[in-house]
Image (tube, coloured by chain):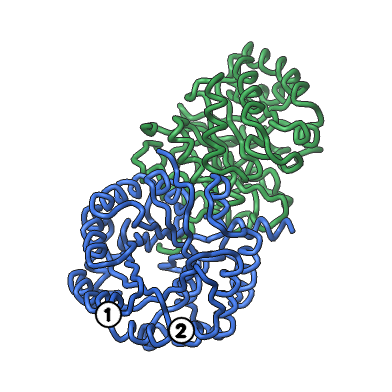
Chain colours: A green, B blue
């Protein structure tokens, strides 16, 4: 199969990456990170989320971050909005794209968002309706598509059914998340094939975590399946592989390096991206999670 | 293309992994590492090398290591022998499989083994002859197959010509080494296709370094090209990605995890392998370089 000529990378670092940090990160530092990613050429950046600060204190300042960033034309700055209240707050903050998130396993859905999968889909209906009324795009996430920390294996058909529902209710794109990073390329391909029965391949995105080092192999497998959108996190923000239950996002630099090698166009400048990752890693005092960044920084 | 049903992993940790360690590692610790790998089910282990201790002091005790290990029937315990003198020492130590190594770039050949590529091939002729006379197998390595630290890009045809020569002179297998880890899946496939013009695919092996995090994607790409032998290093021994010019081998645990996920048979027990890697990492006082091992050890 021929590979896509162009790929869109969605940097989820400012949201998925930083949300689990226990230390406070200033609005100014978050703004700088988003601006750095814009400067590096990302065309889609997940800036924050509008959820209860009780649940995710790190995302409390999302409205201020949106107010502070320099938005470049043609770039999507999105936010997570689990419910109507979140959507309203996002709209008030001037957000033009939002995302809802479901899980592929019942146990994860219950523990992560306190309801069944079916209930979560129902809950999204008014969000989608209000978003459509406001003329803004909605992306759908599905977590645990290649394994669940509580249930183990997750069936490809189960994932495909939820992808179908999210797409049918109006999500312009469905991001398939290997939340615990246990997926391997064969399972990835089967899962995508199952989803592609219901959702066009150019409406599917891959969201891989590198906990078991499999993310790039899974992304290459996804490219072979015609997927052309991937979520990643600059400097691999979002999890330390040493900690229990850690779920590090694949590093944007590592994905970009592979795509460059495959002559796939992204519009992103690797050197500026490495700068962005080096800066935020220093701010949060964490080792840079990108192998590409570490190799490039060591060679500089 | 269908994937191979079986893969042989060659653990090069005791040799390629440990040779650059500046601290002394005792013969007993090396013996224990090889024995641990045997117990984990590896069918091919590169135990050491017979080179001048002036050049590679860490390998000075290879004869003692060979004398100390418990050899299991059906397992190949090999050694690097750059010249006739090395081969003689290896034979004296009872070694039953050796390897010679060429480079795919002239600059690397000159700096690494002090001669041109053509001279290195000539130098191997008496080694191959003597090995054949002694009835032992010879494996051929080619380094820098996807990039050279001095010359940059390396042509696939250049690699293929050397692979052809090594195979023609009697090497039963040619291991294609991405020594600096800069390769990506498309380049990997092209390089293998070029080599496969001259050497049967089941006589080619992939040897990937994970410096830029690309190794597993490249191995998956190689599997799609019909390659069924891969070199790797338990715990990713053989290079720290933080250091300049570091060239870490892909971790055997990470490769095995992917192969297990692909239902490809290897005969290796992942848990025992993780134990082996954890032990040697502790001995040399280095962080375990395998993401799979870190995730499994954190969960235990």
Question: In this rendering, would A174 be left or right of A227?
Answer: right
Estimate the x, y position of residue A98 in percent, counting from the top left: 62, 25
Pick the quarter of the image with the C terminus of chain A: bottom left
Secondary structure at badge 1 equals helix
Quick one: B77 or B291, which is closer to the camera? B77
First in sequence, mark 1 or 2: give its number: 2
Secondary structure at badge 2 equals helix
| Residue at position x 71%, y 15% in the image | A125
Asked if B106 appears above or below A126 in the picture, the reply is below
| Residue at position x 31%, y 59% in the image | B145
Identify the subunit bearing mark 1.
B
Estimate the x, y position of residue A163 in percent, counting from the top left: 61, 23
| In front: label 1 or label 2 | 1
Tell me if I can see residue A273 in this picture: no
Label 1 to label 2: alpha-carbon separation:
20 Å
Asked if A203 appears above or below A21 in the picture, the reply is above
| Residue at position x 42%, y 57% in the image | B229
Q: Which image quarter: residue A180?
A: top right
Identify the subunit bearing mark 2.
B
Asked if B89 appears above or below A37 in the picture, the reply is below
Question: In this rendering, would B173 be left or right of B270?
Answer: left
- Most extreme residue toward the top, as rendered? A133
Question: In this rendering, would B265 be left or right of A299?
Answer: right
Instruction: Give the residue pinned by disc 1.
Output: B130
Instruction: Give the residue pinned by disc 2.
Output: B62
Pick the quarter of the image with the N terminus of chain A: top left
Estimate how packed mark 2 is, as few (under 14), some (14 to 19) or many (20 or more) residues with alpha carbons within 10 Å. Answer: many
Tell me if I can see residue A49 in this picture: yes
Estimate how packed mark 1 is, as few (under 14), some (14 to 19) or many (20 or more) residues with alpha carbons within 10 Å. Answer: some
| Residue at position x 40%, y 60% in the image | B207
């Amino acid at each position: 199969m021929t590979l896509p000529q162009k790929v869109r990378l969605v940097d989820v670092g400012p949201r998925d990456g930083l949300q689990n940090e226990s230390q406070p990160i200033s609005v100014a530092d978050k703004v700088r990170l988003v601006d750095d990613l814009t400067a590096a050429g990302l065309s889609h950046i997940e800036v924050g989320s509008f959820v209860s600060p009780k649940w995710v204190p790190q995302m409390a300042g999302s409205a201020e971050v949106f107010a502070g960033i320099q938005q470049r034309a043609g770039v999507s700055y999105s936010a997570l909005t689990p419910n109507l209240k979140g959507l309203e707050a996002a709209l008030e903050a001037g957000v033009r794209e939002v995302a809802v998130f479901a899980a592929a396993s019942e146990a994860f859905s219950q523990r992560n968002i306190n309801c069944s999968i079916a209930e979560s889909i129902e809950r999204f209906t008014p969000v989608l309706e209000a978003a459509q009324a406001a003329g803004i795009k909605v992306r759908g996430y599905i977590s645990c598509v290649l394994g669940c920390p509580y249930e183990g294996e997750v069936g490809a058909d189960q994932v495909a059914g939820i992808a179908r529902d999210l797409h049918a209710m109006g999500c312009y794109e469905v991001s398939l998340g290997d939340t615990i990073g246990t997926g391997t390329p064969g399972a990835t391909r089967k899962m995508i094939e199952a989803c592609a029965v219901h959702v066009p391949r150019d409406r599917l995105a891959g969201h891989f975590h590198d906990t078991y080092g499999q993310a790039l192999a899974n992304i290459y497998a996804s490219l072979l399946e015609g997927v052309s959108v991937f979520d990643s996190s600059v400097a691999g923000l979002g999890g330390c592989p040493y900690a229990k239950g850690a779920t590090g996002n694949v590093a944007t630099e590592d994905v970009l390096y592979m795509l460059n090698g495959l002559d796939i166009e992204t519009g992103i400048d690797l050197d500026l991206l490495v700068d962005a990752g080096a800066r935020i890693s220093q701010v949060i005092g964490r080792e840079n999670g990108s192998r590409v960044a570490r190799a490039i920084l060591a060679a500089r």
